[in-house]
Image: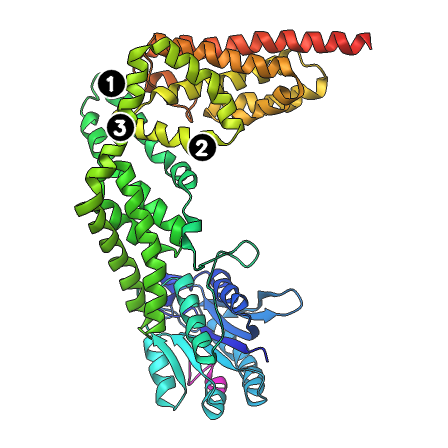
Amino acid sequence: MTKRIAVVGSSGGNLYNLGGKDPEKLLGEIITQIESAGIELAAVQFIAAKSSMDSAGDSTDAAVYVWNEKVSQVVSVFEGPLEACNRYAASLDEEIASQIRAGNVDGLIVMSAAPDGANQQVVRAAVDQQVPIAGTGGTSMAQIASKGALVILTSGTTGTTNRTRAISFLTVFSKHWGIAYRPMIGDSKHASGISASPWKRVQIRGIMMASLPGFIALALILALSKIPGLSMLSEVFDVLIKALPVVIAAVAAKQVSDMEEVSVVAGVLAGVLSIDGGIIGGMLGGIGAGLLVNLLFRKCIEWRFPTTTVNIIAGGISGLVSGLIVYYLLAPIALQAGEWVKVLIEGAVAYSPILAGLIAGLLIWPAIIGGVYHAAILPIVLLEMEKTGNSFLGAVDMVGLVMVSAGITLANIVAPREKSEATLATPGFLINMGFGTFVEAAYPFMFSNKLVFAGAVISSGVAGMLVGLFDVRGTAYVPSIMAPLLSNNMVGFILAMASGLVCSFLITLVANKMAKKKGQAQ
């Protein structure tokens, strides 16, 4: 028979600052975990005040939330002064108490409840029926325990998050009832389980893409440091280079674990200890921290540790252990791996810069269309940027992808095959020029015309040759006007960018004219 759980309580004092101020999100996380465990939600009675209960008074604005089975979500059914909300909640208290006495509620989650106030009937019924209770709120849980309740988990709220509290509640209930339970990350529609194979959540591409803003910030500081009077920013550049492994580690831990603030703390700790290993070391430290967060979190819950302690161990110990492993064992290896990548690229460029640029330019479109770019090329770009703030492949990215895409879309604005294509091309052109991204805007035109596709590859190759010829280092993902300022060779980068745009523009114009003539002839 399916178990049923009721949720009661309030936004609390300390809880208010740790999720209680957003009751829908707080309760939504609990509901996600309840569904994951195959348990039913019997009822909700939650009083959410507009300020912490530590300072709230009878006149403080508040709202009462309940579970609406018809729409399958938590909804606000009453709003007004806190005193009025407490009176309204009393009627709900009696209804849920009746469900408990009728045997329709098998477990009770309480958060900052009022066992002698708005929740007294529910608590009394749970004590009489010996319904297992899990909850947070040191004072209220102590009062509930003193009344003879069957408390299977009690904890304060310090150091907890919506997700860690919810997982803690359902873990102890599942263990108490002997139910198989796999915690879910995210909402119930798009959730991913904390499965027995956490390595499936290790996505190098996702980690690198999410960390990209940190590298762009590094490039901006490098450019500003070259302006007369701002040379002192070179010191900031050195600091940011050391911070990049921390950024990577925090992102990696968050993506692998996604236990909210707990995983971020673990990632930052691991990242600080992984600085000597560069961004590869930071990534290893962050991934390790994320994996350990899930492992230690679940083990500590199974051992019935207080939730606050669980979070401290999961966040603190995970970060330290993973970081120390990188610090003492993996940092030299990781740093050397990054150096090898840089040496390989520099060696290819030194051997024949024009050939290296040509090959990179010719291959970059097939790479992005085939899904290789984000998996392989972008990580290499970031490894280059870690050392110098800009990149050879980053420059090829800007001139061969962004500018070529801009040229193709511009041609379809100026002389489209059909008028509707100008409307399609305009946003793509503006985004590429204004933000240095959205090269996919050229896809509809490339895939519908072989000459445009060939022109994109050829134009990219020409632009890549100029990158090699002028020994340019740069980056994409920034406005086209700003990109040359972030490079090591402003004039050379401008010429390379112009070549990619103009060449692809002219070829697309010719292709469009040929396509229109062919259409008219038919």
**Residue 281: x percent and y percent?**
26, 41
Q: State which mark lies toward you, 2 or 1.
A: 2
Which residue is disc 3 drawn over?
Answer: 340
Please state the extent of the stretch shown in magenta in the rendering.
Answer: 114-122
Q: State which mark lies toward you, 3 or 2.
A: 3
Q: Does the magenta segment cover residue 117?
A: yes
Q: Secondary structure at mark 2?
A: helix
Q: Does the magenta segment cover residue 76?
A: no
Which residue is disc 1 drawn over?
Answer: 226
Residue 53: image quadrant is: bottom left
Disc 2/disc 1 C-alpha distance (Å):
30 Å
Q: Name the residue: 42% across, 38% down.
A: 205
Where residue 374 is drawn, which disc sits there? 2
Disc 1/disc 3 C-alpha distance (Å):
28 Å
Horizontal side of 332 relative to 181 (left or right) equals left
- Which amino acid type corresponds to the residue marked 1 in the rendered image? Lys
**Residue 273: x percent and y percent?**
20, 46
Q: Earlier in the sequence, mark 3 or mark 2?
A: 3
Q: Name the residue: 30% across, 44% down.
A: 284
Q: Name the residue: 32% across, 76% down.
A: 138
Q: Secondary structure at mark 3?
A: helix
Label 3 CA crowd tier, 10 Å (few <14, some 14–19, many 20+): few
Q: Secondary structure at mark 1?
A: loop
Q: Earlier in the sequence, mark 1 or mark 3?
A: 1
